[in-house]
Amino acid sequence: MSTSRVAACSCGQLRIEEHGEPLGVGVCHCLARQRRTGSVFATVAAFVAMLAACNSAPPPVAPMPPPPADAPATTGIAPENTAGLYWVPYVTCDDCAVPQAIAAYLTPDEHVARAIRAALDGKLALGLPYLVHTDELGVAPRAIAVVIGAFGSRDAAARAASASPVVAGVQARAIAIDAKASPAEAPRHVTVVDRGGPVQAWSKADVDAAKQSADGHDAVIAALAPRPAACSVLPGDVFVVEDGDVDWYELAPVRCGGELAYIDWTKSLLGHAVIVRNGGAQTLTQIVGAECDTPSLKTWRYDADGRHDDAPHAPHAAPLAKGGC
């Protein structure tokens, strides 16, 4: 019989009941919890969230659009036993099956990765292919992975890779994933500019100046808006970036003429996952904040033109519990 625990506010109008053992118990001294509790330390017990962004097998997969007349044969690229469309650093479901392998094109060259992605765009389910760095998957060699599917076994990934065409001189391959890899702690990431029009990028100096007078994503973007752009980057542009340059959940690093610059986090595909719900309507969910290791998610309606704010049946900035501090 599982243990039941009840947490409640002092008046008792708000109650939460949890079953089973906690994932962990500890104390936290982050500023957010100090403000909430009025204490230097707060006691934390973390439980598995019932509403979880988990890579269950199989997840819903978007229906494949009809291929263009000149499209190369892609039989086998869209996997039938996908074990998770995206590699998400926050996994909150103990019973969820994480992908065991991916089928992907590997290249260290940003321009080649962009060419592969562009060549496959529209020929797979919406949201595929997606790009991650092999550092985030905990595998070698160090390269950009243009992922065409994530699978519950290496054999399934190998079948999909062997059935895939050579693109930009690169053959897809199957790669076993390190289940213990932590994408959020990887030394390198890949910034991909989302669909839509050209995106304004600001210099690091302008970003630093804006952060002196503004706090939080919306305020920083408003402070940057009147400043001249260092350059504009285009949808589909690809940049390998160092972890230390990522301004998590606020600004995504890119390069302007070889110099570090930043775009609005929500104009990139960092920390995102495309999912399908409600009769095949595509949505894009992205981590847009984190407080004491608990992410906040925002969901947009998503189509060939990119994201739109009026995502139906999807809460905005919904918290997703994970662990404690």
Image (spheres, grey):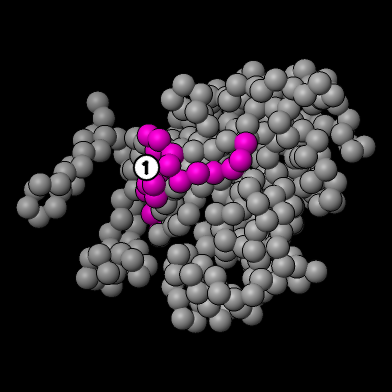
Q: Is residue 240 magenta?
A: no
Query: Is residue 143 visible in the rendered structure shown here?
Result: yes
> Residue at coordinates 45% horizontally, 57% vertically from top-left?
289
Residue 10 coordinates in the image, percent (x, y): 9, 55
- Locate residue 106, reporting x and y percent: 81, 41
Residue 138 in sight here? no
Identity of the residue drawn at 54% across and 70% down: 225
Place of residue 76 in the rendered image (x, y in percent of width and height, measured from the top left): 75, 19
Q: Of helix, strand and loop, which one carries label 1?
A: loop
* Left or right of 280, for residue 154: right
Q: Quadrant of residue 199?
A: bottom right
Quadrant containing the N terminus in the rendered view: top left
Say above or below: 181 vs 30: above
If the image is split into quadrants, where does the C terminus sit?
bottom left
Residue drawn at the location 54% of the way across and 38% of the way down: 302
Which residue lies under the disc numbered 1?
A: 315
Asked if the stretch drawn in magenta spans residue 312, the answer is yes
Residue 262 figure quarter: bottom right
**Tag count:** 1
Residue positioned 60% across, 21% down in the render: 63
Mark 1 neighbour density, 10 Å: few (under 14) some (14–19) many (20 or more): few
Magenta stretch bounds: 304-325
As displayed, is residue 323 above or below residue 258? above
Q: Position of residue 108 (x, y in %)?
A: 84, 50
Report the side of 305 relative to 47 (left or right).
right
Asked whether 109 or 151 is in front, the reply is 109
Magenta stretch, main secondary structure, is loop
